[in-house]
Amino acid sequence: MLHDALEEKGLAICCGTHKECQGVKNPTDAQLGIYPRNQMRLHYYKSTLGKMEDEYGTTFHRTIRVALYCPKHFPQDPNRIILPNSDDPPVYSEIKQEGKQFILEVNRKDIAALIKKGGMEIDPNGKRYPEVEIYRHFGIPDLPEKPDINEVKYRR
């Protein structure tokens, strides 16, 4: 319901942290991190490949994040590759959507396949799981509390 309401109004929720609404009785859209979609910008981050060794062996990990940010949270220097001589430098880049393509500004690489695949940190449409205040702001009622599994299982 929330995402339909946002899309209908041309709005999106910033993936940055908006704490301005805490303790405010009637927070504004901006205090909640809600902005017109056309004011938001997509950002890409890829960390260097990390290596971890433990009792189970060696594992490798990398963070790849695609996030939609408001003007306040969008990085000041969005397009940079650190350590350009490295075989695996971290990458920070603005993403420009051109039709069905999602092009990184820093190297003109299309990441549409990554966007389509999705994942935990791939949020091209804004914050996926916003705080309850945002649902209330749009008049969407709270969900009832989950029942205690023991009450359901044993009919208490």
Image (spheres, grey):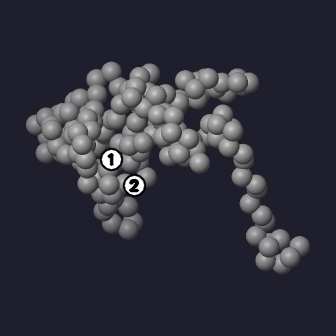
Measured as percent of width and height from the top left, residue 117 is found at 33, 57
- Res. 74 image quadrant: top left
Q: Residue furthest front?
A: 8
Compare residues 55 and 119 and report the one nearer the observer.
119
Residue at x-position 18% and y-position 33%: 106
Q: Is residue 57 above or below residue 128?
A: below
* Amino acid at the residue labelled 2: Gly
Residue with the mark numbered 2: 119
| Position in image of residue 30 (x %, y %) | 55, 23
- Most extreme residue toward the left is 85
What's the residue at 43%, 32% (across, down)?
A: 37
Q: Earlier in the sequence, mark 2 or mark 1?
A: 1
Q: Is residue 151 visible?
A: yes
* Left or right of 31 in this view: 73: left
Name the disc covering residue 124, or none.
none
Residue highlighted by disc 1: 64
Asked if disc 2 and disc 1 are in contact, CB closer than 8 Å, the reply is yes
Residue 13 lies, in percent from the top left, at: 50, 35
Which of discs 2 and 1 lies nearer the camera? The answer is: 2
Quadrant holding the C terminus: bottom right
Who is closer to the viewer here, 9 or 61? 9
